[in-house]
Image: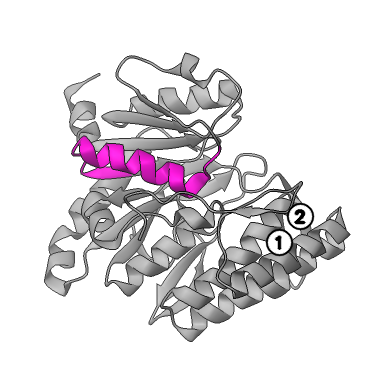
Amino acid sequence: MNAHLDAARRGIAAVVVTYQPDLPQLQALLEALREQVQWVILVDNGSSCNVSGLLAEGDVFLPLEENRGLAAAQNIGIERALALEAQYIYLSDQDSLPTPGMIALLASAYLRTATEGAATGKPIAAVGPATVDARTGVYSCILAERQGRPVRYSPDPASDALVDVGILIASGSLLSAGALRAVGGMRSDYFIDHIDTEWCRRARAAGYRLLAVPAACMQHRLGDAVRHFWFLRWRHVQFHSPLRDYYMIRNSMLMLRDVPMGWAWRWLIVWRRFLLHPGYLLILGDQRMQRVRLMMRGFRDGLHGRGGRLDPVSGVLAPVARTALDP
């Protein structure tokens, strides 16, 4: 590697969380990350496949005996990154793929805003790229924040702008070590879904900024399947398993209960998670009765402040062990 690339990689640790991954896809991700960061930390949530066989010299492998969920696994990886004295932590799902030089573009956003952040008293908690679905080639809309309100922003890959946002998708985000120490890590009791939304709103409430870098691009897969249809406008809707519907509804309720946020963000969560998306699922999705049952269970558990891992067979809601980074 040349000296310029080494300088761009310095102080950056990538935390990748896996669970039953597609091994060729994961191998491509790890190879891409090694070119862009100083440390690669892989946290595996009890996969049955041979994830360790993809590791290279210098990679850090943290195997968990069972599936503790995305949030706890991210915290465990972040803790190791902080112990290595990483300045920035890049989070990645197993099915994401950064384009060459993407992470360096994200890191440069911190440098561009360092003086401004110090002057306004609002440091940067995290920066993230524009994401494009590898299946459809469609860019995800960025939720910018203007005067405390969410505003749809269509990313322009040719722009060198930095956009203040209210939410960043965790996969592809570059988090500041200082912000993680001040704000805390992810909430392990969320297990999966809306972990990043909760952390972002918590960081914003603590006085931090979040930035999107449209010139940085990452391939990412949201949902098990995508459907394209018209409702007031053309939409791409991601469909997950019915179990994921439970976590989305439950964790949305937990956020509304526990996270400081303005009325506009609260209405957005209510509209998207309790009205719009369930409507799509019940009209266009399969396993409708199971989805209804699990969404109602999620609403009740969230209303009563219950988190943890739901066993889809027994219906038992088991607590998830907290980590040192849990808020």
Magenta stretch, residue numbers: 67-89
Residue 28 x, y percent position in the rendering: 50, 24
The label shown at residue 196 is none
| Precedes in sequence: disc 1 or disc 2 | 2
Question: What secondary structure is the stretch in magenta mostly built from?
Answer: helix
Indicate the quadrant containing the N terminus: top left, top right, bottom left or bottom right: top left
Residue 289 x, y percent position in the rendering: 87, 60
Quick check: is 183 in the magenta stretch?
Answer: no
**Residues at marks 1 and 2 touching, judged by CB atoms closer than 8 Å:** yes
Is residue 65 found left or right of 87 in the rendered image? right
Q: Quadrant of residue 99?
A: top left
Going by the numbered disc 1, the residue's amino acid type is Arg
Q: CA distance from mark 1 to mark 2?
A: 6 Å
Report the coloring of the rendering. Answer: one colour
SS for tag 1? strand
Going by the numbered disc 2, the residue's amino acid type is His
Dot 2, how many residues are within 10 Å of its Cα: few (below 14), some (14-19), or many (20+)?
few
Q: Which residue is mark 1?
A: 235
Is residue 130 found left or right of 284 in the rendered image? left
**Name of the residue lying farthest toward the bottom:** 263
Q: Is residue 128 above or below residue 79?
A: below
Q: Which residue is mark 2?
A: 228
Residue 104 visible within the image: no
Residue drawn at point x = 57 percent, y = 81 percent: 267
